């Protein structure tokens, strides 16, 4: 129980204990803001088999008690023209500094984009050159292969022509020897 006084009855303590549990008070109130037990009144409202209902009445705070929060915000001091001018100049300096920072960031970003585009163009050129070189090499290899194939075919045809010529000569010589024998 968070209240303990010689003048509190056991019933008041149990009611306050139930009240504090039911309302789930996160922290215990300080002794300055809490009313004394004589200023707390507990009135029984309803008594049933399922439970009891109470009304807890707290006394009004004393007029000399300090309030935790001021009623109005603290007053601002009056600023002189020089202070206002100084603040305006500082704000202008911050604005210019921020603007310069933004422009610097944009310039760096543009430079980076320029470098990326240049690198992409360079890679594209390199790729085109490599592709052209590969194509030229393939075409040269195909040309050499075709030349070699044509030379081989010509050689083959020449050998066939020689054999055909030999066969023709043999046939003619056989015919001539066969005609002479007849």
Image (cartoon, rainbow, N blue to C red):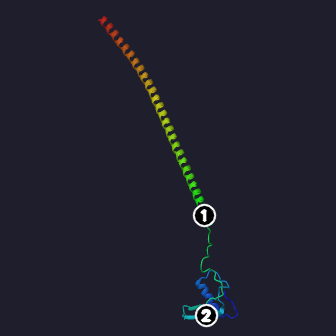
- The residue labelled by disc 1 is 85
User: Dot 1, crowdedness within 10 Å: few (<14), some or many (≥20)?
Assistant: few
3D distance between C-alphas at marks 2 and 1: 60 Å
Is residue 11 depicted above or below 97 in this figure? below
Is residue 157 depicted above or below 135 in this figure? above
Question: How far from the left and from the top, in percent, is residue 169?
Answer: 36, 11
Q: Is residue 105 left or right of residue 175?
A: right
Q: Nearer the viewer, residue 172 or 94?
A: 94
Look at the image and tell me in which quarter the N terminus lies.
bottom right
Q: Secondary structure at mark 1?
A: helix
Q: Secondary structure at mark 2?
A: strand
Q: Based on the displayed image, in which of its 4 quarters is residue 78 positioned?
A: bottom right
Q: Is residue 127 left or right of residue 170?
A: right
User: Dot 2, crowdedness within 10 Å: few (<14), some or many (≥20)?
Assistant: few
Outermost residue on the front side: it is 81
Q: Tell me which residue sits at (51%, 44%) in the image.
A: 117
- The residue labelled by disc 2 is 41
Q: Based on the displayed image, in which of its 4 quarters is residue 98 positioned?
A: bottom right
Q: Tell me which residue sits at (30%, 7%) in the image.
A: 179
Question: How far from the left and from the top, in percent, is residue 99?
Answer: 56, 56
């Amino acid at each position: 129980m968070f209240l303990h006084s010689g003048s509190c009855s056991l019933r008041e303590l149990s009611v306050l204990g139930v009240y504090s549990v039911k309302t789930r008070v996160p922290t215990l109130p300080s002794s300055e803001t809490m009313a004394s037990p004589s200023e707390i009144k507990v009135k029984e409202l309803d008594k049933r088999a399922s439970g009891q209902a109470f009304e807890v009445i707290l006394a009004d705070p004393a007029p000399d008690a300090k309030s935790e929060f001021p009623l109005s915000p603290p007053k601002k001091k009056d600023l002189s023209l020089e202070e206002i001018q100084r603040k305006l100049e500082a704000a202008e300096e911050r604005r210019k500094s921020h603007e310069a920072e933004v422009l610097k960031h944009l310039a760096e970003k543009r430079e980076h984009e320029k470098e990326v585009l240049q690198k992409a163009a360079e890679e594209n050129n390199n790729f085109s050159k490599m592709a052209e070189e590969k194509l030229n090499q393939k075409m040269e290899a195909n040309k050499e292969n075709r030349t070699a194939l044509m030379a081989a075919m010509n050689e083959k045809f020449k050998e066939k022509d020689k054999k055909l010529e030999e066969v023709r000569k043999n046939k003619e010589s056989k015919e001539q020897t066969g005609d002479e024998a007849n």
